[in-house]
Image: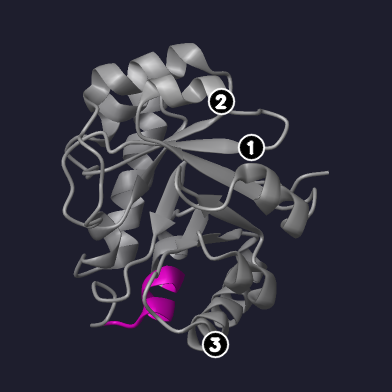
Amino acid sequence: MRRRFALDLYLVTDRAMCARLGIERVVADAVAGGVTLVQLRDDVTPAAELVAIGRRLKALLAPADVPLIVNNRLDVALACGADGIHVGQSDAPPAEARARLGERAILGLSITDPVQLGSVDPALVDYLGVGPIFATATKEDAAPAMGLAGLAAARAATTLPIVAIGGIAEGNAAEVVRAGADGIAVVSAICAADEPRAAAERLARTVVEARRGR
């Protein structure tokens, strides 16, 4: 049985943006404010150091029953006991990730164009990270923004849960949910906030209200 998870408010960490308060403080405050899933995204920190960070975050998240996902780095996910992994189109194939992490792990896959949905195996993948919806500066190699129309097209083409990502903030989160996203993934909207808990509370409230209005 797969690990239980909710995509409502998905925090993707950025170590530089979290530097002022520290990544653990930001994550703890964000979860207190309503974050339901946390992804440790860091492509530059050495594996041993990132494993240590992952283990601390896992211990921090466990009492709140919030899963920890590691972006791309299978070795780190395995070593720190993460609840799952998120892979992009050019990362480890979903079949390999599933084989190495086991059936209980949460497996997410990035979709940057709705045409990519044709090759997704719903028996392997638990959710889709669709985007970027809007232009974003938090990922240097981000694909072109697909907009709300691209999100709606992806929603119409799959029954898998969708978390939208890319340029999402308090001001546009509601329209993203109304376009079909099951949840929103944010980076700077929380990591760069002066008060991460308050920022998370506002975003979580926006998601709930937008879902009611669909």
Q: Residues within 10 Å of mark 2 (few under 14, many from 20)?
A: few
The kind of residue tagged 2 is: Ser
- Residue 161, given in percent of the width and then of the height, sits at 55, 30
Please identify the quarter of the rendering in which residue 124 is found: top right
> How far, Cα to Cα, is label 2 from label 3?
34 Å
Q: Are marks 2 and 3 in contact (CB under 8 Å)?
A: no
Question: Number of labelled discs?
Answer: 3
Split into 4 quadrants, where in the image is the N terminus?
A: top right
Q: Circle 3 sits in a helix, a strand or a loop, which is it? A: helix
Q: Nearer the viewer, mark 2 or mark 1?
A: 2
Q: Are marks 2 and 1 in contact (CB under 8 Å)?
A: no
- Residue wearing tag 3: 48
- Residue wearing tag 2: 119
The kind of residue tagged 1 is: Val
Q: Nearer the viewer, residue 156 or 113?
A: 113
Residue 212 visible, this orientation: no
Q: Residue furthest top?
A: 156
- Tag 3 or tag 2, which sits nearer the N-term? 3
> How far, Cα to Cα, is label 3 from label 1?
27 Å
* 117 versus 100 height, above or below: above
- Residue wearing tag 1: 125
Instruction: Give the magenta part as a residue range.
Output: 21-28
Please identify the quarter of the rendering in which residue 65 is found: bottom right
